[in-house]
Image (spheres, rainbow, N blue to C red):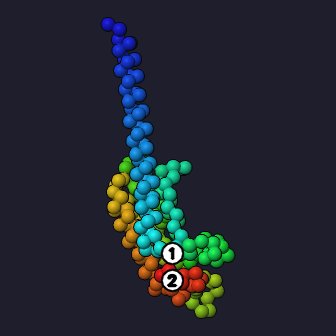
Amino acid sequence: MDFDGVVDRITEGSIADRVARTVISEEDETNDRMELARDIGDEIRKIFPKSYVNSRYSTNLSKSIFVTFALGKGTSEWANGIIQNDDAHNTFHIWFKPDGVMEMDASGSFMITVMPPEGSHMAYEGISVPFRKTKVKAGDNKKVLAVVKRNFSRLKDALKKNKDNLGHPEYAEGKV
């Protein structure tokens, strides 16, 4: 019996099958994550329909969804045309860990820029809106969307509460 010939045929078929299954599963995984990124953007736009939202899936450094939010819709609604000058500019990541967990992280909280109390030496002050680091089992997109909705609803409530004290209140008109 030619043992080497049998091993070559088994290995060749197995490798080709495994590669094909891996490519298909990675494409499905990428499509699911791209869809989740779109759904996250849509969920935020339901709460802030007149604001800037960018939610995208990337594999550059690590598999993740990166979300950028600003109260203003574009450069004409940001102080000096700079997104980082927006009173509610915030970003967060959803990291896809190898152990099958999605981890949402906004570095501890969202921030809102407000005017400081009278007599302060500071130009602006920040108000923290809690955004807890959340771990979700991969594929539990409904839970991710619920967390996004909860956190952006908190942000909207904080903006409403501090509407008259924002750093650039003229850009927040009609948005909170």
Q: Residue furthest left?
A: 1
Q: Label 2, secondary structure: give it.
A: loop
Q: Label 1, secondary structure: give it.
A: loop
Q: Is residue 140 left or right of residue 113?
A: left
Quadrant where the N terminus is found in the figure: top left
- Mark 1 — residue? 50
* Near-viewer residue (110 or 172): 172
The amino acid on which the numbered mark 2 sits, given as a three-letter code, is Gly
Q: Give the label on residue 136, or none.
A: none
- Mark 2 — residue? 174
Q: Residue furthest top?
A: 1
15 versus 161 height, above or below: above
- Residue 80 position within the rendered picture, expressed as x and y whole percent measured from the top left: 67, 76
Q: Is residue 171 left or right of residue 26?
A: right
Q: Residue furthest right?
A: 80
141 versus 53 height, above or below: above
Label 1, residues with CA under 10 Å away: few <14, some 14-19, many ≥20: some
- Residue 28 position within the rendered picture, expressed as x and y whole percent measured from the top left: 40, 45
Query: In which image quadrant can residue 43 be found?
Result: bottom left
The amino acid on which the numbered mark 1 sits, given as a three-letter code, is Lys
Label 2, residues with CA under 10 Å away: few <14, some 14-19, many ≥20: few
Query: In which image quadrant can residue 46 be found?
Result: bottom left
Query: From this viewpoint, is residue 11 visible?
Result: yes
Q: Residue at x 38, y 24 (%)?
A: 13
Q: Residue at x 51, y 49 (%)?
A: 59
